[in-house]
Image (cartoon, rainbow, N blue to C red):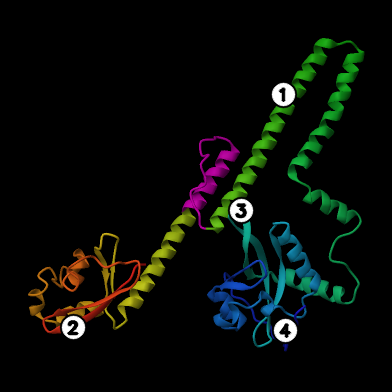
Amino acid sequence: MKTNRPVTNREILIKEGALLVSRTDVKGIISYVNDDFVNISGFTRDELIGANHNIVRHPDMPPVDFKDLWLTLKVLRRWQGLIKNRTQSGDYYWVEANVIPVFKNEKVHEYLSVQRVACREKVEKKERLHKLLGAGKTVKRPAGLAARVALIKETDIRKKMAFALAVLLVPVFYLMYRLFLAQDYPLLAGVAASAMIALTISFDVINSFTAMLNKTIGIFYHLFEKRFGDVRDLARNDLIGDFQRTLYSMEVNLDLAQAREDAAKAMQVNQALGNVHTGVIVANNDFEIIYMNDSLLDMFKKAGSDSGTPLPNCNTDKLMSGKTDSFYRYSVPQHQPNLKKPYRSELHIAGHVIRFSICSL
């Protein structure tokens, strides 16, 4: 296991509400980190991207914790636990980490880690456990009765419910046996019919519940891939229907949040293009101008009123409603440029020579 040195005894406290988000490939190589992760780790984003996630591993963390993490992920389950990480300077910080497999085309594509501030009580308990592990006085996995309880908790829910039904049916079958011996056939038939109805309803509930859970898991996997619109069964009037409607509301909110994020990124691009000195035009598939930065507008305005002679359709106040061929059709009259590859040309406006490149996005 990689050991990162040096280390200090200085703890860095994470701000309440901060989320440290990272993505790695299936081998643990970092492909994405958010700003909170970069700021708390002390590494630059360039140092983190392409590095193994163990770049922030603290040597105080026992190997058994990470072995448990990878074993859990390999069986396609979410892992949760407290982790002590090391900053670039050697300081440390505690986080409560949730690591989940992200699927693409029904295969694990990457792992997503979301870390938040850890509860101090849990941190103190974890530190005591680490000291015991270091001294060889305890084990990570439960044993004895605790192991049996853990096994029951981890058993598939359908098996547990089927076992519970079997236990409940034991006294029913015993009652039916006593009624058979007493030759009370009408009552025996009533008990048998009631038992069959109860079994049918119970199995229907179990199947509906497990089907809903499996569908929900699939929906969440699609949400990780930013694929929305999977919730369809909204007509049920029972508890499962309420859950589906709540899930649908969450999906809509995530879709809106994604739209806002895309809009914010587009605004950032807009602002960035607005600050460059090179003129930029963006057009849609019909060659209608949907964006033009200030540099290009200033360029045409400086060309003066004479620009209306060679380009009668080029009114600087109406450029956004025009088409790009208002510019390049005079320099390329034979045909539209092939936008499958960058195209370069120039045009002359009132004694000004404008060289331009056109490419598809």
Residue at horizontal 51 percent and vertical 52 percent from the top: 250
What is the distance, in whole Å, between disc 2 and disc 4 at their CAs?
59 Å
As displayed, is residue 211 above or below residue 170? below
Q: Residues within 10 Å of mark 4 (few under 14, many from 20)?
A: some
Residue indicated by mark 4: 4
Q: Amino acid at mark 4?
A: Asn
Given the current orientation, which residue lies at the most extreme front position? 334
The nearer-to-camera label among 4 and 3 is 3
Which label lies toward us, 2 or 1? 2
Please, what is the three-letter code of the amino acid marked with disc 3? Answer: Glu
The amino acid pointed to by label 1 is Ile
Query: Which label was assigned to residue 285?
Result: none
Kindly identify which residue carries mark 3: 106
- Separation of marks 3 and 2 at Cα, in angstroms: 55 Å
On the image, the x and y values in percent for residue 81 come to 72, 66
Of labels 3 and 1, earlier in sequence is 3
Segment tinted magenta in the rendering: 226-252
Q: Position of residue 49 (x, y in %)?
A: 58, 77
Quadrant in the rendering for residue 145: bottom right
Which numbered circle lies on residue 353? 2
As helix, strand or loop, the secondary structure at mark 2 comes to strand
Circle nearer the N terminus (2, 1)? 1
Q: Which residue is mark 1?
A: 197
Quarter residue 27 falls in: bottom right
Looking at the rendered structure, the secondary structure element under dot 1 is helix
Look at the numbered disc 3 and give the secondary structure of its residue: loop
